[in-house]
Every structure is written in structure tokens, then in C-alpha cells.
Amino acid sequence: MLGKLKELWQSSDFARENLNFRETVGLLLEKYGYDRDTLLLGKEISCPELISDFEEAVKGEPFGYILGKVPFFKENFFVEEGVLIPRCDSEVLVEKAIELIPKNAVFADICTGSGCLGISVLKERPDLKAILLDISPIAKRVCEKNISSLGVADRCSFIQFDLFNDTLPQCSAILMNPPYITKEEMKKLPRNVMREPALALDGGEDGLDFYRYAASSKDFKNKLLIFEIGYMQGIALRELFGGGDIVPDLSGNDRVFILQ
Ligand code: GLN
């Protein structure tokens, strides 16, 4: 079977840019209950499901969707087609939120998707409560699954929420990782990102639709704001809100906007 997988791998221009062969095979072996190194140590197995997952991966299906879960910050989060896959770039936002949200506060996590930001903060800060909000019914199902599997159901709830039309519930801090990809960038996304929901990526013409609305809404006034932003949006955010700080991610790109 290893030979077949290597052949698939080599015939694809995609896999090599995004995934490492050994890790890919290892994670799929684990998914089907085998020891990570089984095949790589030369033991033969027959697992047609593993081959078909592998085929999907080299065709560009995001690996998180194939496995059904992804590690983020300190936990594993369930994901499925229709919610954005958590990125390690977002972990710096979690760190800032843990540091800055005042004691015993209630915070909102808007565009929560899988719930990875808000739930990660709650796990580290037992004094806090949260409202996790997203417009998508798939996000609702996946986020509620993560809320209960990660044991934070007593301190948070999910609300289906349309930022542009609904009123935000009472809270004193707001986390938000909204769609922020520009119209031009949306046309050139890597193949795997194209399989993720446009609803979670498409931020309008200049990618700033959600931030522009937030800057004009009274729901966002006098609150601690911690937003994820695109790597070229720092200056625009500071202009929209008339100030604020920008924090880079681990790759050194602008990633988080903070207004205190
Ligand atoms: N960081 C994501 C990406 O580059 C985008 C997430 C978002 O639009 N909020 O694909």
C-alpha cells in the first residue's frame, strides 16, 4: 500500500507544497486505529478507506476535514466542511485575550466558527463567561459539539447571529475573527482554502466590511476589542477606529488589532 500512496503523492503537484508525506500517512494511519509508523516501517496493511482519504488530500481537500478535528492552542477541535479550519496564526489572539480580558467579564466571540478562539480563552480563564456567535447553522452544530466535548457548557452558549442585523448581547469584551479576504485575493486562494466556506473568508471588496460595520456600531463602543486581521490591514484598522495596537503573529505578520 505504501507504494500506491507514494505514487499518488508524486503524481500531485499540490500535496508537496502543503503537506509532508510522512505526517500525512501517519495521521491517516492513526485515524484508522493503526500505529503511526506501521506502513512506514514496512508492515503491509490493506485499508481502502485510508487510500481514498489520501486521494482526497492530494486533490486538495483540507486535511482537517478529512480527520474531522484539528489541534488548536491546547485542545483538539471538531471541524467539518462548512466551518473554517482553525489556523495557528490565530493563537496569538487567544494569548492576548487571556492576558487582557478583565476578571469575571463576559466576552463575545463573533464569527466563532468551530468556537476555537472563545473556548480556548475560557479553558485558560475559569473566571470568564462567553457568548459564541456565528451566522452559520453548520458553525452552530460544530461549535456546540466543541462546547460540550471541551467541558465549558456551564460558562458559555452559542447564539446564531447576523452581525449586520442583530443586536449584540451584553458583554464587555469582543473577540472577532471575521472574513477579511479581499475580492481580488478570493480569486487566487490556494486550492485547499477554496474548499473552506467563502462565508468565513470573503470580507468584501477590500476585505474590511466587518470591521467597517464594527467601527460604526454602538454595540462595539466602550468595549475591549480584539480582532484578527489580514497581514496588510493594520493601518486600515487603526484608521477605522482612530487608534489601537497591532500585534504580529509568529511569522511576523500583522495579525491582531486591539482597542482598549
Ligand atoms: N487566515 C485565513 C486565511 O488566510 C483567513 C481567515 C479569515 O478570513 N478570517 O485563509
Image: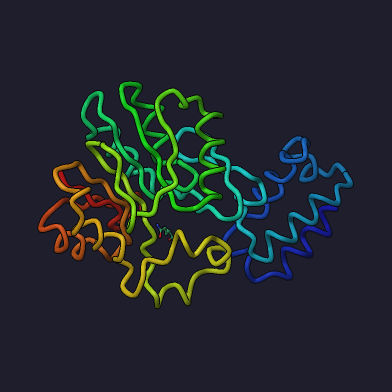
Q: Nearer the viewer, residue 75 or 163?
A: 163
| Residue 194 percent coordinates (x, y) | 55, 67
Q: Position of residue 83 (x, y in %)?
A: 53, 52
Residue 70 image-quadrant placement? top right
Query: Left of 194 or right of it: where is 134?
Result: left
Please tell me which residue is depicted at 54% across the width and 29% down the height of the picture: 148
Asked if 28 appears above or below 131 in the picture, the reply is: below
Q: Residue at x 56, y 55 (%)?
A: 82
Q: Quick one: 10 or 126, which is closer to the camera?
A: 126
- Dividing the image into 4 quarters, which one contains the C terminus? top left
- Which residue occupies the foreground of this view, 205 or 96? 205
Q: In the figure, residue 223 lies in which quadrant?
A: top left
Residue at the far left in the pictured view: 242
By what rule are the colours in the image chosen? rainbow
Q: Position of residue 188 (x, y in %)?
A: 48, 75
Residue ID at (58%, 41%): 78
Q: Is residue 124 above or below residue 5?
A: above
Above or below — where is 165 with respect to 32? below
Q: How many marks?
A: 0
- Residue 184, picture quadrant: bottom left
Say which residue appears at 80% left-offset and 55% top-offset. 51
Q: Quadrant of ligand 1?
A: bottom left
Percent x, y for residue 100? 22, 35
Q: In the rendered view, does 103 fall on the left or right side of 54?
A: left
